[in-house]
Image: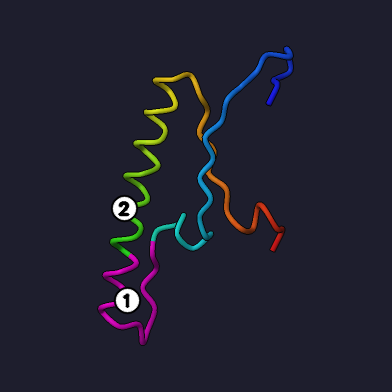
């Protein structure tokens, strides 16, 4: 992709479901197992996003996180 100055910019893009990009919200009737799974997924993704950002910064790339809502407009 070229920036406004016609210089090439490299991106690393991560695609995730929208619900995995926000902190889990506890709802009534949700099992403890589901809550733990959602919290573990959230923490894992946060660590991955931070590592990807550091990696991109080191190589001069840009990191972009996309969701299905951004890709398909849902």
Q: Which colour scheme is used?
A: rainbow
Q: Nearer the viewer, residue 30 or 52?
A: 52
Q: Residue 55: give x, y in percent of width and height.
A: 38, 28
- Confirm or deny contact between disc 2 and disc 1 (CB under 8 A): no
Asked which secondary structure carries label 1, the reply is helix
Q: Assess whether residue 21 is covered by the magenta stretch.
A: no
Q: Residue 27 vs residue 36: left or right?
A: right
Q: Could you say where residue 19 lies in the image, as x and y percent from the top left?
A: 49, 63
Which image quadrant: the C terminus?
Answer: bottom right
In the rendered image, which quarter is residue 73 located in?
A: bottom right
Residue 52's spot in the image, x, y percent?
40, 36
For this view, does 4 lie left or right of residue 67? right
Which residue is depicted at the point 74% across and 18% down? 4
Q: In which quarter of the image is the N terminus?
A: top right
Q: Percent from the top left, x then y, of residue 54? A: 37, 28
In the image, the segment drawn in magenta is 24-38
Crowd around label 1: few <14 · some 14–19 · many ≥20 (10 Å): few
Q: Distance between the residues labelled 2 and 1?
A: 15 Å
Q: Which residue is drawn at 39% across and 68% down?
A: 25
Name the residue carrying label 2: 44
Report the side of 44 relative to 23 (left or right): left
Q: Which of 30 and 57 is in front in this view?
A: 57
Q: Please tell me how many numbered marks the rendered image carries.
A: 2
Q: Name the residue under label 1.
A: 34
- Element marked by disc 2: helix
Please tell me which of labels 2 and 1 falls first in the chain.
1
């Amino acid at each position: 992709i070229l920036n406004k100055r016609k210089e090439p910019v490299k991106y690393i893009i991560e695609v995730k479901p929208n619900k995995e990009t926000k902190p889990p919200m506890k709802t009534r009737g949700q099992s403890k197992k589901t809550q733990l799974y959602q919290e573990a997924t959230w923490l894992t993704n946060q660590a991955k996003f931070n590592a990807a950002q550091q990696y991109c910064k080191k190589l001069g790339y840009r990191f972009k996180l996309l969701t299905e809502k951004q890709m398909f407009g849902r």
